[in-house]
Image (cartoon, grey):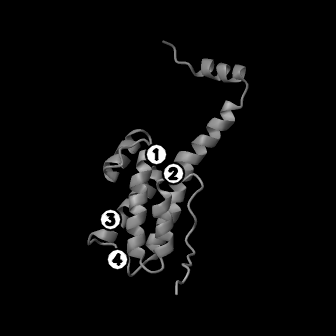
Amino acid sequence: MVVPSHTIMPVHHVDLPPNCRPDYNEARSIFGVSPKAAAALLRLCIQKLMVSLGQSGENINADIKALVAAGLPVQVQQALDACRVIGNNAVHPGEIMIDEDPSIVASMFEMINFVVDDRITRPRQVAELYGRLPEGARAAVEKRDKKDA
């Protein structure tokens, strides 16, 4: 008999890149059984998300450093680093005892959705609205903001 999985973890953000969704959804489905496994999958999700944020996806720490150098807001940096460290502790012995406090893994779902909203959804929404402005208005803004050569 197959028992359907039941989870209270949040669904992925609508703008989570498609290549990240299977890992996120699998983490949701196993969180109640294995928070460590869920944390490892969410760390993988973050690694894949780095590519959508313009990074290599090969080294999360280096990718976050590059994003910080490019002006990443501190809250987003902290969300990414929290997921990176918690996920690393799931697969390597560390100071975070996931078995003792699985709620720390639960927060990773929220942090991933926060990062997607901040880095993907909001910029897209602003660009869509700005693109709907009349061409003359956009040209005036560009002229206003043009730096003197």
Cα distance in 3D space between marks 4 and 3: 12 Å
Q: Position of residue 124 (x, y in %)?
A: 60, 41
SS assignment at label 4: loop
1 or 4: mark nearer the eye:
1
Q: Earlier in the sequence, mark 1 or mark 2?
A: 2
Labelled disc at residue 17:
2
Compared across the picture, whether 2 is left or right of 91 comes to right
Q: Is residue 83 above or below residue 35?
A: above
Q: Position of residue 72 (x, y in %)?
A: 45, 44
1 or 3: mark nearer the eye:
1
Evaluate if marks 1 and 2 touch, with contact meaning CB atoms under 8 Å apart: yes
Q: Is residue 2 above or below residue 49?
A: below
For disc 4, the neighbor class at 10 Å (few under 14, some 14 to 19, many from 20) is some
**Front-most of residues 142 and 7:** 7
Residue that mark 4 sits on: 97
Q: Earlier in the sequence, mark 3 or mark 2?
A: 2
Residue that mark 3 sits on: 88
Task: Check the image and name the residue furthest to the left.
Answer: 93
Cα distance in 3D space between marks 3 and 2: 22 Å
Which residue corresponds to the image point at 39% horizontal and 72% vertical from the top-left? 37
Cα distance in 3D space between marks 4 and 2: 30 Å
Q: Position of residue 90 (x, y in %)?
A: 34, 70
Q: Earlier in the sequence, mark 1 or mark 4?
A: 1
Q: Amino acid at mark 3?
A: Asn
Q: Amino acid at mark 4?
A: Met
Residue that mark 1 sits on: 52
Task: Check the image and name the residue furthest to the right.
Answer: 134
For disc 1, the neighbor class at 10 Å (few under 14, some 14 to 19, many from 20) is some
